[in-house]
Amino acid sequence: MSGWLRGALGLLYPSGLRCLACRAEISEGEGLVGGLCPHCAEGMQVLPCGEPCPACGQPDGSRGCRACLPEPRRALQQIQAAYSHDGAARMLVHALKYRGLRQAGHLLAAGMAQVCADMQGEWDVLAPVPLHRRRQRQRGYNQAEVLARETGVVCGLPVACLLLRSRATMEQARLTREARSQNLQGAFAVRGQVRGLRILLVDDVCTTGATGEAAAIALREAGAQAVSLLTATIAVYRGG
C-alpha cells in the first residue's frame, strides 16, 4: 500500500482514540477517562474554593497577593476559577478556543459547576463574557457561552447573554498588565434588563481579572445587584 493511501485510511479509520487535551493516541486497552488519557485526567485537580484573593481570584490569597493590579476591584464581588491555567486544563481551554472541540468545554464545566456550588453567594443567572461579533464569526461560537451553558445544566441556573462587546479590542494576552484595563474601557454594553439581578459572569481564563471587571462595571452601572466571575482556569502567580 502506498504511503499516501495508508495516511488517508489512517485519517478515515484511526487505530485508536486521542486524548482531548494532549492529543496522545490511546490504546484500546488503556481507554479514555471522560475523553482524557489517564495522565491528563489525573492532572485535572479542582482548585480549593476556600480563600481566594478578593481582588484577583488567586488561590489562598484572602489577605491580598502580589499578583493584584494596582487598581482594586470595585465592580466584581469575587473571582473564582476551577483549575490552574496549566497542564491538561490549559490544553483543554486551547482545544475549546482554537480547535473547535466543544467536548473540551464539557470537561472544564464539570469542575466549574463544582466550584459554583461551593462559592459563597447566590445567583439568578449565568452570563457569558461576550466576544466581539467579528471574532465570534471567525471562531464560529463563543467559548464562554459554551462553558456557561454546560455549567448551567449541572448547576440548574439559567444562562442569558446580557452583554455585547461594543467595540473590538486587542487580545489581552498580548498586552502588559497595565494596558489591559485601558484596552477594555467602554468595551461592553448591556443588553436587556439587569436591574436587581445577581449575576455570575462566566469566561474561559482569568489572568488579571481586567476583562471581568470591565464587564461587571457595565452591569453594575445598569443596575445589577451583584456581579462575580467564574472561569475555567486562572493564571496562578508563582511568586518570585
Image: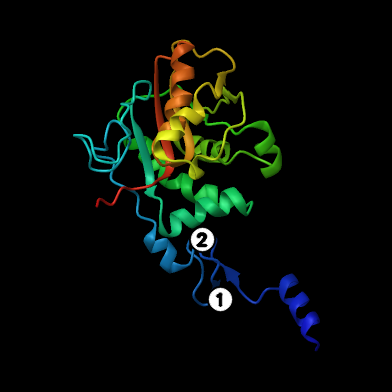
Q: Residues within 10 Å of mark 1 (few under 14, many from 20)?
A: few
Answer with left or right where residue 2 lies relative to residue 193.
Answer: right
Seen in the picture, residue 113 relative to 101 is either above or below; the reply is: above
Residue 161: x %, y % from top left: 58, 26
Seen in the picture, residue 229 relative to 234 is either above or below; the reply is: above
User: Can you identify the residue that label 2 sits on?
Assistant: 21
Residue for point 34% across, 21% down? 74
Residue for point 28% across, 31% down? 54
Query: What's under tag 2, amino acid-wise?
Result: Ala
Label 1 secondary element = loop
Answer with left or right where residue 4 lies relative to residue 144.
Answer: right
Residue for point 38% across, 61% down? 43
Residue 105: x %, y % from top left: 54, 47
Answer with left or right where residue 213 lies relative to residue 99.
Answer: left
Question: If the image is split into quadrants, where does the N terminus sit?
Answer: bottom right
The numbered disc on residue 28 is: 1
Query: What's under tag 1, amino acid-wise?
Result: Glu
Residue 178: x %, y % from top left: 40, 34
Label 2 secondary element = loop
The numbered disc on residue 129 is: none
